[in-house]
Structures are given as C-alpha cells and as structure tokens.
Amino acid sequence: MRNGEIALVTGANKGIGKEIVRRLAVEGFTVYLGARDEDRGRAAAEQTDGDVRFVHLDVTDEDSVAAAAKRVEQAHGRLDVLVNNAGVAVEWGVAPERIGADVLRRAYAVNVFGVASVTRSAIPLLREGSRVVNMSSPLGSLTLMSDPASPVSTRHLLAYSSSKAALNALTVLYANVLRPKGVLVNAANPGLVGTDLNGLDAERDGVRTVERGAEVPVRLALLAADGPTGGFFGDDDHATAGVVPW
Ligand SMILES: NC(=O)c1ccc[n+]([C@@H]2O[C@H](COP(=O)([O-])OP(=O)(O)OC[C@H]3O[C@@H](n4cnc5c(N)ncnc54)[C@H](OP(=O)(O)O)[C@@H]3O)[C@@H](O)[C@H]2O)c1
C-alpha cells in the first residue's frame, strides 16, 4: 500500500485518466483528480472511492496550472506521482491535406505545451523516487511512422501523431534533466482503448477497456526508485513486446 504518497493525474474526469485515479486510490495514494471543468471533475471525484480530491486544472491555462501545483505544495510539500494524461485528438475525419497550423496548435496546446507547463510547475515538488508518466501513443513513434510495414505509417494524423512525437522527445529530455534528482520519467502506451478521444467502444469495437488501458500507466506510476527512466513502455500483449520504439 502507498498510504501517504501523493499523485496528480491531469484530464482525469473520464476515460483512462479517471481509471488511473481509481487504481492509485485503491493503492492508498492521496490522488488529485485534475479536470478543466469543475462540474465534471467534482462528479468524477465523488464517484471514486478513496482519498480522491478534485483540483481544477486546465493544462492550457498557466494560472490554473500554477494554482493546482500550489495547492499540492501547501497541503503536502511534495508529489510522488504525476500522470500527464490530458490529451486531445482534433483531426478525425479531416483530410491531412487540409490540416494547417491552426489544427496543430490546438493539439500541441494540450498534448505538448500542456505537459511542459504542468511538469515545470511540478518539478519543485518531485523528489528522489518520484515518477512522471506521460501518456503517449505508438502513433507518435517515428520508427513506426516510417516503417511501411507498420499500420502506423498509414494513419496520417499530422497533428496528433506529431504532438505525441514531441511529447516523446519531452519525455527523454525531462528524464535526462531529472535523472540527477532520482526522478523517473517514462512514456506509456495504453494500447487502443475505447474512449471519447477516438469514439470507439470496447465491447462494440473489440478494443481495450479503460481498465486494461490503465495497466501500463499505473505500472509506471508504481515503479520502484531503481526502475527505468527515459523509456516508452507498453505491455507484453503489444506487438512491440513491452518496449515501444521511439
Ligand atoms: N484511447 C486511446 O486509445 C489512447 C491511445 C494512446 C494514448 N492515449 C492517450 O491517453 C490519454 C487519455 O485519453 P483518453 O483516451 O482517456 O481520452 P478522453 O476520454 O477523451 O480523456 C481525455 C481527457 O483529457 C481532458 N482534457 C482535454 N483537454 C484538456 C485541458 N486543456 N486541460 C485539462 N484536461 C483536458 C479531457 O477533459 P474534458 O472532459 O473536459 O474534455 C478528458 O478528461 C490522452 O493523452 C491520449 O492521447 C489514448
């Protein structure tokens, strides 16, 4: 049990993030459930057993990010786990030829700049053994994008895929920056999970449930201090056998 450990999960009012919160609360964490919408966030926190506390957190709003970090600092002075889960996919159904910088900006605002903003605010609270988990995707893998044999090379999601590639770069860079402090920073591939992000349904479409999708990020959130850092991990059922290529 992790009683006394403190976690913050962004974009946690629904989907995989909400399930990550539930699982960390079961482990005994005090979990801050970050959500940009107060009603949705409070409702999700009330539905979840354990020490789960709603915190208003719009990752695109620096004031909101700073206020959330301040709240954790004032209550605990530290953060054991940060899950950068908030993410958007903004281009379903739009031909890649029509995707311009405006669409990329909307994806990057949450998937890249939001992560940088939240992580910077959290760094003073991270200590030796703390874990940062960034929710990535094989769609952001340059190796898979450039492999004609990989289905990823046929997806053409200019905004989403390039934003997750940038997130992957941030993961390695933060891992390098925080290595001397003993903080572990890794990217998680939850697999293809039925959520509002993709409009898929686990039962109808034969994709993963949120319970299944939360397994890899939760495993990374629970790493021991001597665990890996600067890696991109999925699970053993995935074609990449646990390690996703950058
Ligand atoms: N589903 C998959 O197959 C899959 C695969 C690989 C990676 N991922 C990644 O997993 C993460 C979770 O996705 P999901 O599938 O669970 O999607 P989801 O159900 O759509 O959840 C996304 C969450 O992000 C929040 N969010 C969006 N913009 C935000 C902002 N500016 N500030 C704070 N929160 C914000 C949403 O809040 P609102 O309710 O207010 O919109 C929602 O709570 C994402 O990073 C996604 O890219 C998902």
Image (cartoon, rainbow, N blue to C red):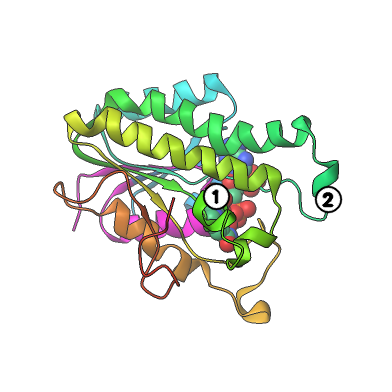
Q: Position of residue 1 (x, y in %)?
A: 18, 58
Q: Which residues are magenta?
A: 1-30
| Residue 21 highlighted magenta (yes or no) | yes
**Residue visible at 53% across and 72% down in the picture:** 209
Q: Residues within 10 Å of mark 1 (few under 14, many from 20)?
A: many
- Relative height, residue 194 to residue 55 (above, below): below
Q: Amino acid at mark 1?
A: Gly
Residue 8, picture quadrant? top left
Q: Position of residue 190 (x, y in %)?
A: 47, 61
Considering only order in the chain, which callout, 1 or 2, is on the residue closer to the N terminus? 2
Give the numbered dot on residue 197: none
Q: Position of residue 165 (x, y in %)?
A: 53, 43
**Residue visible at 53% across and 58% down in the picture:** 144
Left or right of residue 227: residue 141: right
| Residue 58 highlighted magenta (yes or no) | no
Q: Which residue is mark 1?
A: 140
For the residues labelled 2 and 1, the Cα–Cα distance comes to: 18 Å
Tell me if residue 192 can be seen: yes
Q: Residues within 10 Å of mark 2 (few under 14, many from 20)?
A: few
Residue 219, picture quadrant? bottom left
Tell me if residue 38 can be seen: no
**Residue visible at 66% across and 38% down in the picture:** 107
Q: Which residue is mark 2?
A: 94
Front in this rendered view, residue 142 or 173:
142
Front in this rendered view, residue 113 or 9:
113
**Residue visible at 44% across and 50% down in the picture:** 246
Left or right of residue 68: residue 139: right
Front in this rendered view, residue 129 or 231:
231
